[in-house]
Each structure stands twice: as structure tokens, then as C-alpha cells.
Image (tube, rainbow, N blue to C red):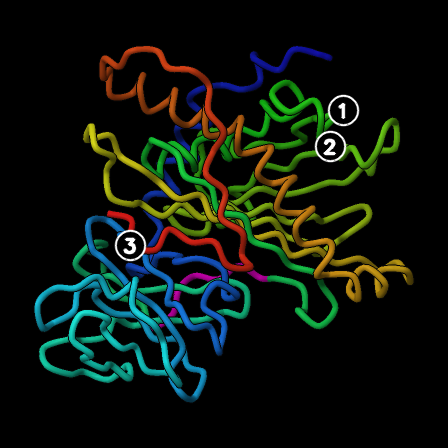
Amino acid sequence: MRPTWREARPGVIAGALARARERPSGNWYVLGASREVAEGRRQPLGRTIGGVEVVAWRDASGRLVAGPGACPHLGAPLARSPVRCGTLVCRWHGLALDGNPFAGWQPFPAYDDGVLAWVRLDAVGGEVPLERPVVPVRPDRDSAVDAVCTTVGRCEPEDVVANRLDPWHGAWFHPYSFVDLHVVRDPGAGGGSATEDGFVVAVSFKVAGRVVVPVEAVFTAPEPRTVVMHITKGDGVGSVVETHATPLAPDDSGRPRTAVIEAVVAASGRPGFALARAAAPVLRPLMRAAAGRLWRDDLAYAERRWELRTAAPHPPRAPRRPQVSEDSGATEAGTA
């Protein structure tokens, strides 16, 4: 492979990251896949985001509800309580929450975009609130297959975003997935709109053995904690890969933790893609596994960046596999 280190100029990556951090998020954070908070689920989804314990579930009408994760009575962890007919019932003393304000418990603004569930935490974000999160343009869900993979790393959201704003590492760091990667255009040191500020990349995705699919894609950062890859040429035009970085509570040693919640929304104009949509329940675990393999390496990149950036002395540790949460059920409920 041709070396890419000369093109991967630190200043270009840092400039793109700085511009991403200046864009508004409206204080919205991705909780997880919409399927993790599906209607009829008997357990809520729980996460601690930026030090705020959050619990989410569906009310009796199917509406996404999110709010503080501590029971207003005596502080029980609501993420470990059951959902019965759209009502969250505290397992300590039976206090019931239907999603409306009650006994000092106030819901947070929540939004379901059909693929991901979001929560707005104004106290954490500190920005001017937006009515809705910044959701990237996606293909029509009725003609696409989507899957969501969640991994957790010991770093901050900006380290995850910086990793995604370095497309030059793709073929070198992930040779099992990419070949012939070439950055056609980078944003340089200038600003501009989301389109003008994107990285245009020509790359071939490995399918099986020597079979590859060449595409052209554009990487953009529409808000501080999100990087989106849109396929603009080749097979799968319109497909997107969204990488969302959600800050969690620090680990026991005080190191920051970030959930990488990646949504793949795949579409294709091929006639046979209708079969792929029909086989979506079988394809989703394979799509999550592929994303998890990539993030096993990319989280090592992000964690290393955080260590160097903060100059924090940490003893070397054995390589580890990232925690992977399937959008069909596994969550970090109650993680603090």
C-alpha cells in the first residue's frame, strides 16, 4: 500500500475537529438504538450520560419517554425496574411513572428518529437547546436495512470524532475491510458548509476474499459528537454510516468513558436488495459484528489519542475487546 502519512496532516484533522466542535448540538445525546427501547419491552434502557443518570422507555401510546434514572422517592435505580403497560414501576416501593411529571420527577425531552433514540440534557450540554437533534439525511427506512452497534472506550467524544475525521488510516489500520483508499479532497484549513467541509474518499470495501465494492464517500461532522459517511458514488448510493459519541460516567480510576453508537443505514438500487431487506433480522447481527470489529481497533486509536492528549500516566494493559451492545436488547442499564 502507498503510505498516507504525508497527506494525513495533523493540522487538517485538528481543523476539521475544531469546526465540528463549534457546530450546535442543541444538547442532544444518542441513548442507543430505537430497538433497545422498543414498544412492549419490559425493561427500560438506562445510561449515565455526562454524569446524569437517564432511564428511557415507551409509554402506553408507544411514545419514547426519558427522565432521571433515580426514583424520586428514595433514589432507587429505575433502569432496573420493570415496565408494565407503558408505566415504569419502581421495584423498591412500587412508585409508578407514566412519563409525565410526578413527585418531583421531571422527564427530559426525548426524540426517536426511527433508528436512534435521543435525549436532551441541557445541564450537560450547556448550549442553546434545539427542539430536535441534528439528524443526518438517510435513505427511506422502507427501502433500507439498518443496524446499530454500541461499543465503549476509555476516552472522550472528541477522540472518537478525531478518529473518524482521519480517513487516511482506513486501509492501513483496517486492511481486512478496506483497500485502495484514496482521499480525493480534504477540507484543508478553510471553513465552509457541511458539504464543503467534508472529506471525499474513494475506497473499495472488501466483501469476501478478493471481491471488493468500490465507492466514493463523503465524511462530514454535522455536530460536535457525530461524524457521518454518505456514499455518493458506486453501489449503495445514499447509504450512510453515522458515528455518534456519547459521554458516559468515568470508570473506577477516573478515566472518561464514551459510548460509540454507530448506525449503518444501507440502501441499494440493485433489484436483489429487496431480498436483503427481507433478510434484515439475519443481516443485522452480521452488520453489528463488522462494525464491532472496526471499533475494536478504532477505540484503541481513540484511547491512545486521549492518553497522549492528556499526558496521563497509565500502566500498559493487555489488549481488550470492546463492549458491544446489540440493538436487539443488550444495554448498559444502570451503568454509573
* For discs 1 and 3, the disc positioned in front in the rendered view: 3
Q: Residue 92 appears at what percent x and percent y?
A: 18, 70
The residue that mark 2 highlights is: 203
Q: Earlier in the sequence, mark 2 or mark 1?
A: 1
Label 2 Cα crowd, 10 Å radius (few <14 / some 14-19 / many 20+) = many
Q: Which residue is mark 3?
A: 334
User: 37 or 21: which is nearer to us?
Assistant: 37
Taking the image as shown, residue 256 lies to the left or right of residue 35, namely left
Q: Is residue 169 left or right of residue 210?
A: left
Picture coordinates of residue 293, whole percent (x, y): 60, 33
Q: Is residue 202 magenta?
A: no
Tag 1's secondary structure? strand
Q: Position of residue 326 (x, y in %)?
A: 54, 52
Specify few, some or many for label 1: CA neighbours under 10 Å numbering under 14, 14-19, or 20 or more. Answer: some
Q: Disc 2 and disc 1: Cα gap in Å? A: 6 Å
Give the residue number, with chain letter if any, for mark 1: 180
Locate residue 91: give its quadrant.
bottom left
- Marks 2 and 3: which is nearer the front? 3
Q: Residue at x 64, y 59 (%)?
A: 146
Q: Distance between the Cα atoms at labels 1 and 3?
A: 43 Å
Q: Is residue 133 magenta?
A: yes
